Image (spheres, grey):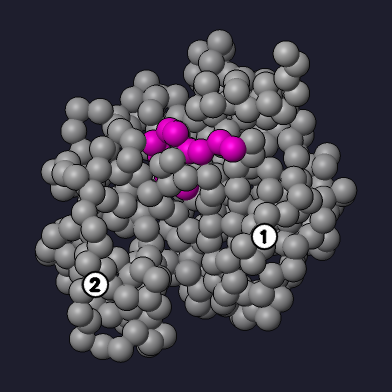
Amino acid sequence: MKFSTLALAAVAQVASAHYFFDTNIVGGVQQPAFKYVRQSSRAVKYNPIKFSSNPAADIRDGSTVDGPDIVCNQGAFASAGKTEVLTVNAGEEVRLKLAVGAKFQHPGPGLVYMSKAPGSVKSYDGSGDWFKIYEEGVCDGGDFTSTAWCDYDRDWIAAKIPKDTPNGEYLVRMEHIGVHRSHVNQPEHYVSCLQVKVQSGGNGTPGPMVKFPGAYKATDPYANFSIYNGRKAFPMPGPAVWAGGANGGASSPQATTAAKEVATAPASKPTTLATVPVAAKPTAQAGCAALYGQCGGQGFSGAKCCASGACKAVNQWYSQCLN
C-alpha cells in the first residue's frame, strides 16, 4: 500500500503531538494552504522552536527562540513575496488553523501579536516592534497538565484586531507554547505569521512594544514553570495585551487572566458555564470588562459588567465575559 507524503506527515505529526499552521479561516471558510500564511522552509514543518541553551539534541533544524526563526518560523520571510495579503476591518477576527488535521495536544498558552510594516508587508521581515493583542492560558478546573488549558485539543487560535488599530499592513503572529517540558527549561514554541491589511481602523497607540527575538528569555518564569505537582498561577510570557486606546501601555485581562486566577483554584472537574446577572447592560462604556475579561469571582473587585458578551461563571473564583 502506498501513502502520500501528506498522509505520512500527518501520521508523524500525530505521533509526536507537534503541529504547524498552514491556513486561516475567513467568514467560516478555510482558505487554501499558505495563501495568506507565510510558509516556513523547514523540512519538518511541525518541529518546535527551543532556546539555544537547551541540549543540542533537542534543538530541531537549528531553530532557536533567541534567534530570527522565532519571528515567523524558519525561512518564512522567503515566502513573503508570494503570500497574499488579507484585508480585514479593525474589530474583525483573524483565525489560524493547524495543518493536516492536528490539534493542540500540549498544555500551554496561545498568543497573538501584531507588527506594522513600514510599507508593504510582503517586503517586511518582522524586525520592527510587536505588540500583543490576545493571550489565553487556563480556562477551567480541568486537568492542569492537559484539558484545563483553553486551547487544548483545539485546532485554531483566533483574535480580534483591536478597533483602535491604525490602518496599514501588518504581520499577525500566532503562537502556541507547549510548557510540558518547561520544568526542565525546554518550552516548545510553534509560530506562524499571517499577512494582513487593516482598514477602518483608529488612532490608537499600540503597546507595550517588544522585539523578536528578545521578547522571551530562557530565564523567564514561563520557561521554568512546572505544570506538575499541583495547580499554580501561570506566568504569561511577553508584554501585556493591548486592547485598544491611546495609551500604549493599556491592556485588559483576557482569557489568560483566567489562567492566573483559576490556576490557584484546587483541581476539579470542568463545570458548565452559568450566566451571572450583571448590574449594568453590556455596553462599550468605560469601566466594563472587555470580551474575555474577568467580570466576577470570589475576591474580585473589578468591573462586574461586560462591554461585549455576558458575564459567565467558570467557577467560584473566576467569571468571564463570553459570547
- Quarter residue 147 falls in: top left
Q: Amino acid at mark 2?
A: Thr
Front-most of 251 and 143?
Answer: 143
Local packing at callout 1 (Cα closer than 10 Å; few below 14, some 14-19, many 20+) is few
Quadrant of the rendering where the N terminus is positioned: top right
**Which image quadrant is residue 33 in?**
top right
Q: Distance from label 1 to label 2 (Cα)?
A: 30 Å
Residue 124, image x, y percentages: 79, 52
- Rendered image: mark on residue 275: 2
Task: Inspect the magenta stretch and tell me whether residue 100 lies in it.
Answer: no
* Left or right of residue 81, residue 168 in this image: left
Direction from residue 275 to residue 175 in the image, left or right: right
Look at 39% across and 36% down and name the residue there. 107
| 29 relative position to 16: left or right | right
Q: Quadrant of residue 175?
A: top right
| Residue shown at the point (76%, 50%) measured from the top left | 32
User: Residue 166 at x, y = what percent?
Assistant: 66, 74
Name the amino acid, label 1. Answer: Val
Residue 3 shows up from this direction? yes
Q: Is residue 107 magenta?
A: yes
Judged from this view, the residue extending furthest toward the right is 82
Q: Which span of residues is magenta-colored?
A: 101-110
| 239 or 284, nearer to the observer | 284
Residue 260 visible in image:
no
Indicate which disc, 1 or 2, sits on the residue closer to the N terminus: 1
The secondary structure that dominates the magenta segment is loop
Q: Which residue is mark 1?
A: 29
- Determine whether label 1 and label 2 are within 8 Å by CB: no
* Outermost residue toward the front in this view: 1
- Disc 1 on helix, strand or loop? strand
Q: Secondary structure at mark 2?
A: strand
Residue 91 picture location, percent across and down? 57, 74
